Image (cartoon, rainbow, N blue to C red):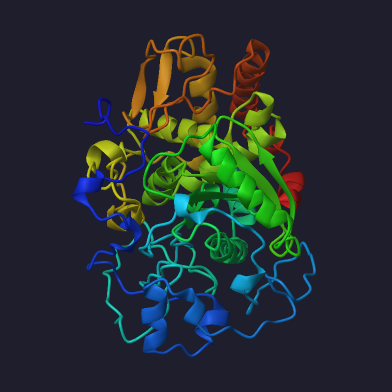
């Protein structure tokens, strides 16, 4: 099904003759109840009419919330700080303040839409869901979801109390203990994700003034379980059902977004830059959350792989600590920057997952093979977030410690993996022969994107950089094999200070 799919790489929308055009408002009846998490909205007393208005897309009828000193929006001062801060209320710009004579009809439809987006923060003790743009009301009633110990936590909005920590593996040796300590010190906290989610919510509201049917998704490491305290935020703006030409249409849309950021939202958005890459983005910094963001248009594969990786992150408790230490190691050795010809964090995560899949006694399966319906590349976007909640934990017979797995990871890529002839495939859970297409020919590193089949490591296009990467794997394996001390390849104190 997957390799020959005609929908590969396309947005997950069926042909127009099979569905209404307002795809976002098709909320399935079996989705659990909604509950907004942002305290400033929870505190407001919404009634049934407010709920109906919001679900129908009529945002203008909702009551404003009382702004606090630190707010997004136009009117209240914004104080920047590197310290975690919570925000309870924000003013909204009036419709009259929008300065653009944008021709909305190109993307506009008479139907307003509602979707499930950005269920965030794994909290095993909570079985509530929240849909951005929805509110608690008489329409929804709580429903119990059975607690499967160790299963992937359900997702929900941010800004709740601190989560109950998921069970971590026991560390019986020094190296494993160092890996665990680094993970616990540097993993993304609930407060970190809360701030990103607050920014996403506000930006979605403002962008919808230009593109009324659009939805903004938080994707990438912030949501997939592999984020750190210093992780940037990745956003995907979905403006319509059909594919978007990234060279022309996406750039035009992003130029309008950049203009919005640099004018009406300049009080809390700074340095918005349009980067004309293969997948163009707007880079910017949110002064309130103090987070750097990358925003793309309709790159929906990023939404799919976010929830695939999230499932891998939580079905086995050794996965997240191992991935975090590899990302920190790669960053310390300057081989974790695709813009400079080395490995992206996404490629590094896939490399770790692939290694854990290919052990003589695997620690991870191929989720796409075992659960094809849950990770169908044509699944509608508003259903994608449900997959992690339905996958049980993977019970591996492999009892290797975190330390042994880290040493084995470096050994695998230093001595066992055939870079010249093999491709890393998490989808197949094994190394497979390189395809003969132009995407793979004469490439130094081939890492298959699990949904659209592209090469996530295509940025490594210089032999010098490739040789540096291979050399770092070899040196780190030899040192760690002999010393069994993480400090020998990654200074822990400095790394923890940087988070």
342 shown above or below 467: below
Give x and y (percent) for residue 318: 45, 46
Image quadrant where one finds the N terminus: top left
Residue 192's x, y, as percent?
62, 61
Q: In this view of the protein, which residue sits in the foreground, 224 or 312?
A: 224
375 sits to left or right of 210: left
Q: In the rendered view, would you say 431 is above or below 296?
A: above
Where's residue 24, x and y in %?
35, 59
Position of 98 with respect to 375 (left or right) is: right
Q: Name the image quarter holding residue 20.
A: bottom left
Determine the image quadrant of residue 93: bottom right
Whether residue 173 appears in this view of the structure is no
Q: State the image quarter where residue 12 is shown.
A: top left
- At horizontal 52% and vertical 39% (from top left) the residue drawn is 249
Q: Residue at x 77, y 61 (%)?
A: 82
492 and 164: which one is in front? 164
The x, y position of residue 92, in whole percent, is 62, 75
**Residue 484: in sight, yes or no?**
yes
How many numbered marks, from 0 up? 0
- Residue 491, above or below 446: below
């Amino acid at each position: 099904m997957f390799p020959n799919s005609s929908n590969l790489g396309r947005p997950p929308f069926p042909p127009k003759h099979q569905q209404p055009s307002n795809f976002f408002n098709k909320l399935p009846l079996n989705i659990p109840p909604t509950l907004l998490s942002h305290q400033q909205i929870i505190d407001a007393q919404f009634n049934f009419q407010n709920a109906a208005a919001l679900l129908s897309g009529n945002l203008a009828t909702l009551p404003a919330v009382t702004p606090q000193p630190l707010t997004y929006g136009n009117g209240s001062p914004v104080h920047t700080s590197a310290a975690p801060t919570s925000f309870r209320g924000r003013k909204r710009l009036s419709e009259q303040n929008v300065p653009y004579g944008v021709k909305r009809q190109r993307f506009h439809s008479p139907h307003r839409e509602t979707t499930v987006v950005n269920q965030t923060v794994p909290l095993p003790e909570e079985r509530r869901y929240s849909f951005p743009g929805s509110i608690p009301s008489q329409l929804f009633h709580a429903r119990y979801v059975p607690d499967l110990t160790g299963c992937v936590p359900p997702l929900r909005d941010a800004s709740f109390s601190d989560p109950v920590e998921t069970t971590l593996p026991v560390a019986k040796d020094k190296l494993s203990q160092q890996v665990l300590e680094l993970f616990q010190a540097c993993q993304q906290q609930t407060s970190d994700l809360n701030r990103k989610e607050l920014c996403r919510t506000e930006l979605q509201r403002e962008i919808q003034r230009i593109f009324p049917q659009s939805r903004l998704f938080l994707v990438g490491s912030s949501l997939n379980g592999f984020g750190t305290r210093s992780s940037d935020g990745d956003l995907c703006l979905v403006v319509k059902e059909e594919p978007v030409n990234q060279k022309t249409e996406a750039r035009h849309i992003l130029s309008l977004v950049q203009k919005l950021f640099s004018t009406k939202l300049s009080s809390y958005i700074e340095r918005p830059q349009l980067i004309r890459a293969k997948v163009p983005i707007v880079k910017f910094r949110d002064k309130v959350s103090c987070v750097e963001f990358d925003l793309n248009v309709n790159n929906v594969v990023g939404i799919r792989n976010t929830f695939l990786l999230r499932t891998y992150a939580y079905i086995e408790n050794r996965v997240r600590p191992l991935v975090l230490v590899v990302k920190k190691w790669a960053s310390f050795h300057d081989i974790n920057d695709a813009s400079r010809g080395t490995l992206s964090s996404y490629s590094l995560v896939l490399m770790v997952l692939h290694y854990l899949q290919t052990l003589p006694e695997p620690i991870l399966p191929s989720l796409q093979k075992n659960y094809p319906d849950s990770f169908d590349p044509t699944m509608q976007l508003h259903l994608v977030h449900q997959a992690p909640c339905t996958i049980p934990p993977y019970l591996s017979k492999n009892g290797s410690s975190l330390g042994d797995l880290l040493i084995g990871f470096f050994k695998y890529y230093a001595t066992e993996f055939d870079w010249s002839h093999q491709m890393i495939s998490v989808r197949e859970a094994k190394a497979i022969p390189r395809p003969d297409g132009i995407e793979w020919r004469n490439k130094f590193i081939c890492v298959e994107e699990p949904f659209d089949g592209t090469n996530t490591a295509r940025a490594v296009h210089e032999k010098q950089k490739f040789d540096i990467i291979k050399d770092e794997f070899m040196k780190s394996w030899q040192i760690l094999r002999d010393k069994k001390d993480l400090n020998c390849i990654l200074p822990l104190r400095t790394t923890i200070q940087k988070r």
